[in-house]
Amino acid sequence: MRTYIQAALFGAITILAPIKGLMLLTMMFVGLDTIVGIYASLKTGYAFRSSRLFNLAVKTFFYTGSILLAYGIDMLVLGGTTFGVPLLSAKIATVIWCYIESKSIDEKSQMLGNRPFWTILKEGIKRAKSLKDDIKNIIQ
C-alpha cells in the first residue's frame, strides 16, 4: 500500500513540476499580504482577530486551484502552448492573482501613510531617465 501511495505522490509531483514556480510565487504574495496586513492592523491599533487568518487558507487554496485548472486547460485543451507561449493560461492566472495581492499590499501601505507604489515607481523611472540623459551629456 505504501508503494502505491508513494508512486501516486511522485506522479503528482512530476505532473505539477512545470507550475511549481507559479504556485510558489502566488503563495508568497498571499503570505506577504498577510504579513503586511497583520503589521498594518497592529500599527494602526485596529483589533486583530486570528479568525481572519482563515482567509489565508481560503485564498491560497482558491488561487492555487485556479492555477491548477488553468494548467490543465493549457495541457489538455490547448496542447501546452498558446501563441507560442508555454503555459500561457497558467501564467495569466498567476499574474492576475499576484496583481490583486500587490494592490492589497499597496492599499495597506497607504493606510499606514505611505505613498502609492505606482507613484514611487513612476518617479524612479523618471529619475533613471534623467540620470541616463545626464550621463549621455557628460560622455559627449
Image: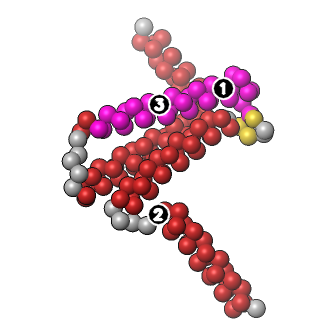
Seen as rendered, the residue at the extreme right is: 83
Magenta span: predominant SS is helix
Residue at 53% in and 48% down: 99
Q: Is residue 128 left or right of residue 108?
A: right
Point out the stretch of residues depicted in magenta.
52-81
Residue at 66% in and 80% down: 132
Q: Secondary structure at mark 3?
A: helix
Which numbered marker is on residue 73?
1
Where is residue 68 shown, x and y percent of the image? 56, 28
Q: Quadrant of residue 110?
A: bottom left
Disc 1 residue type (three-letter):
Ile
Q: Is residue 101 left or right of residue 135?
A: left
Disc 3 residue type (three-letter):
Phe
Q: Secondary structure at mark 2?
A: loop
In what quadrant of the picture does the C terminus appear?
bottom right
Of mark 3 and mark 2, the one earlier in the sequence is 3
**Residue depth check, mark 3 versus mark 2: number of the one nearer the observer:** 2
Measure how far apart labels 3 and 1 are at the Cα level.
16 Å
Of mark 1 and mark 2, the one earlier in the sequence is 1
Q: Quadrant of residue 130?
A: bottom right
Which numbered marker is on residue 62?
3
Residue at 42% in and 8% down: 1
Res 21 visible: no
Which numbered marker is on residue 39?
none
Measure how far apart labels 3 and 2 are at the Cα level.
27 Å
Measure how far apart labels 1 and 2 are at the Cα level.
36 Å
**Residue depth check, mark 1 versus mark 2: number of the one nearer the observer:** 2
Disc 2 residue type (three-letter):
Pro
Where is residue 98 shown, x and y percent of the image? 52, 46
Q: Are marks 3 and 2 in contact (CB under 8 Å)?
A: no
Which numbered marker is on residue 116?
2
Image height of 130 relative to 121, above or below: below
